[in-house]
Image: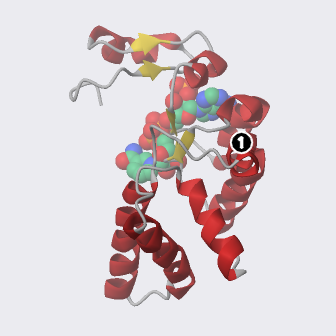
Amino acid sequence: MLGNGHPTTVWNRPAGKADALVSEGATLAGSVGDAVAASEVVIVCVSTYEVTRGLIEPLAAQLGGKTLINLTTGTPDDARSTAAWAAIANQDQARVIDEGDYATEISNVSTNRLALGHILQASKELGVDASWLEPVKQAADELVAEGYGNDSFARTFEKAKTKNQVL
Ligand SMILES: NC(=O)c1ccc[n+]([C@@H]2O[C@H](COP(=O)([O-])OP(=O)(O)OC[C@H]3O[C@@H](n4cnc5c(N)ncnc54)[C@H](OP(=O)(O)O)[C@@H]3O)[C@@H](O)[C@H]2O)c1
């Protein structure tokens, strides 16, 4: 990220472990909360999901509207339950839907449509059933065709409402 010129804020329990990154231009945060506050995309990579949850759960309010990427290894159930927690905690997404204001500068429909295409293609190649994702991709396809590609991905909710689907 630093190599590509993206402003990057880092945090580690003993701050000294971040010295190398700071010397390359990263900003050292004094706390996990400061690191989250400074970032639109938050990447977590710690020893276990238990540690991950312990670090991010107190910051639920601050994580609204941000993209959370967890690289920590865990079980599929760990991943599902953390994703469910993040969805519930994402009050900002709910606000976007409630207010019908889908303007965004990050993670728009077009970007997510491409990602969904890749996931569906990779699943097909691996023989994994990802058919449950097809209505989401279809919603993104339709939104792009209708000129909503730059809107927040939350706009897929409008498609779900129209078709009475759960996306
Ligand atoms: N290494 C790889 O190639 C690789 C590849 C795929 C996935 N992963 C996964 O990525 C995760 C991290 O792997 P790693 O190789 O980077 O392990 P690591 O070098 O042992 O790093 C573990 C990190 O977790 C932090 N940590 C542990 N308990 C903490 C707590 N209570 N509060 C705050 N921070 C805490 C440690 O911080 P301290 O410095 O304070 O101890 C350390 O920074 C693991 O889940 C691993 O399975 C690693």
- Judging depth in this view, the residue of 120 and 98 nearest the camera is 98
Q: Secondary structure at mark 1?
A: helix
Q: Residue at x 41, y 50 (%)?
A: 150
Q: From the top left corner, tell me how far across and down residue 139 is, in percent.
A: 51, 73
Q: Is residue 88 left or right of residue 137?
A: right
Residue at the extreme left: 3
Q: Is residue 167 visible?
A: no
Above-or-below relation of 33 to 118: above
Instruction: State the quadrant of the C terminus.
Output: bottom right
Residue at the spot 46% in from the left edge and 47% down from the top edge: 107
Residue 104, image x and y in percent? 50, 40
Counting from the top left corner in percent of width and height, residue 35 is at 56, 20
Residue 9 position, x and y percent, is 45, 19
Q: Is residue 79 visible?
A: yes
**How are the colours assigned in the image?**
secondary structure
Check the image and report above or below for 12 versus 60: above
Pointer 1: residues within 10 angstroms few (<14), some, or many (20+)? some
Q: Dot 1 corresponds to which residue? A: 53
Give the image quarter of residue 34.
top right
On screen, residue 165 versus residue 15, left or right, reads right
- What's the residue at 66%, 56% (across, down)? 83
Q: Amino acid at mark 1?
A: Arg
